[in-house]
Amino acid sequence: MSGERRPPRPLPRPGAYMDTAPFWAGAREGKLLLQFCRRTGRAQFFPRPASLATGRRDIEWREVAGRGVVYSFTNTFNAWPGHEDRVPYLCALVELDEGVRILANLLNVRAEDVRIGMKVKLCWERLTEEFRYPAFEPA
């Protein structure tokens, strides 16, 4: 139906699961922030209350450059609710230079041009005035 009302695109809920407010505050400023273990220096993503390396709450947020490679990807034709008007779209697991993987959309590239190992860099999707969401494009 042409007049069918679709659900809006879901928005992040900072703090709904745990304290992700620093991540979203950085995103609002165009900065990609990751958590790092202060003892080992290892990065981790997604945000957690403690270090994956030590189990301690000795973690800090640091800005990263947002460079990496495509680890895996898919061209999505069946959208989940709120994304129907975006199909097809590319979703990738990007391995950042810091060694963590982040699930994000690939922008400014055709599906037939994406390759595993392709270098990518951070860009941003603006969801609302309040929210930017990390995405990646060819480097």
Image (cartoon, helix red, strand yellow):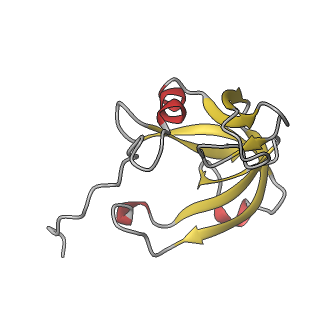
In the rendered image, residue 120, in percent from the top left (x then y), is placed at 75, 45
- 79 horizontally vs 57: left or right: left
| Residue at position x 67%, y 45% in the image | 137
Residue 11 sits above or below residue 41 on the image: below
- 58 horizontally vs 91: left or right: right
Q: From the image, which quarter does the N terminus lie in?
A: bottom left
- 81 horizontally vs 42: left or right: left
Q: Nearer the viewer, residue 27 or 87?
A: 27
In the rendered image, residue 37, in percent from the top left (x then y), is placed at 76, 36
In the rendered image, residue 83, in percent from the top left (x then y), is placed at 39, 62
Q: From the image, which quarter does the C terminus lie in?
A: top right
Q: Nearer the viewer, residue 20 or 108?
A: 20
Residue 139 in sight in this render: no
In the rendered image, residue 131, in percent from the top left (x then y), is placed at 41, 36
| Residue at position x 59%, y 49% in the image | 107
| Residue at position x 60%, y 61% in the image | 91
| Residue at position x 63%, y 69% in the image | 74
